Image (spheres, rainbow, N blue to C red):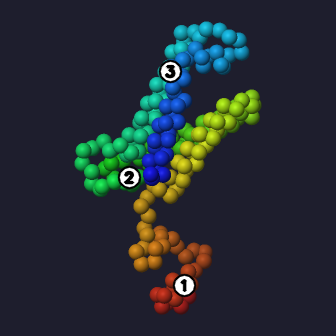
Amino acid sequence: MDVYYFYSYGTAAWLALQAAPLIASPTMIVTLLSPEVREATTLEVYFSRTLGFALLTIGVLSVLLTGSVPLSSRLTEAGGTSTDASDPKAPYALPTLTITAFFHAALAFYQYTMWTEVGVFSYALGIIGSGILAIVALWCILFASSDGRISRKTGADKRTSGFPFKNVEADKRKGRKGQ
């Protein structure tokens, strides 16, 4: 499985896991969060379920907009997904990846601050989930967002330069002798 697909489906699964208790039993969530045991108000139930549906929507949109599920019936290339803007399968892949990466990083930071303040173990689990997804997203942005310009002869990336160091071996092969 491609790392890009892992991130896309992992984001959707993580958000669905967070949304499930918000939608299914908002009274339980309010009971766990409040210092005294009481019944949830209508407004709290509304906001809890609305947040749950919003998390599900963000998860589905991240899968659709990253190109993990092709939205057109015509595929120009068999298999694989690129984040190239000219790719017809995923024109919004890189912006969606970037926004969800910031979302996961902000969520992990917030969960970390809550964990250091109250010390509840469930915040630590949230840090692990959101942190892993934020790191994978950063990796995808840095290394999986372009096809690269790999030379067929040398296997090196053609976009590299010799600054500040010269590539003496490459100059020897070209016959320039370290100019």
Q: CA distance from mark 1 to mark 2?
A: 35 Å
User: Which residue does the image show at 67% across and 33% down from the upper left?
Assistant: 123
Residue located farthest toward the front when viewing the structure as drawn = 1
Asked if residue 19 shows in the view, the reply is: yes
Q: Residues within 10 Å of mark 3 (few under 14, many from 20)?
A: some
Are the residues tagged 1 and 3 within 8 Å (C-beta)? Answer: no
Q: Sequence order check: which comes first, mark 2 or mark 3?
A: 3
Q: CA distance from mark 2 to mark 3?
A: 32 Å
**Mark 1: which amino acid?**
Glu
User: In which quadrant of the rendered view does residue 169 lie?
Assistant: bottom right
Q: Quadrant of the C terminus?
A: bottom right
User: Which residue does the image show at 43% across and 58% down from the upper left?
Assistant: 146
Residue labelled with disc 1: 169
**Mark 3: which amino acid?**
Ile
Answer above or below: position of 130 versus 151: above
Q: Position of residue 66 (x, y in %)?
A: 41, 45
Q: Position of residue 99 (x, y in %)?
A: 50, 42
Residue labelled with disc 2: 81
Residue labelled with disc 3: 23
- Observer-side mark, 1 or 2, equals 2
Element class at badge 3: helix
Q: Which mark is residue 156?
A: none
Residue 84 or 60: which is nearer the viewer?
60
Q: CA distance from mark 1 to mark 3?
A: 62 Å
Asked if residue 51 shows in the view, the reply is: no
**Mark 2: which amino acid?**
Thr
User: Which residue does the image show at 47% across and 56% down from the upper left?
Assistant: 144
Element class at badge 1: helix
Residue 42 or 12: which is nearer the viewer?
12
Q: How many marks?
A: 3
- Observer-side mark, 1 or 3, equals 3
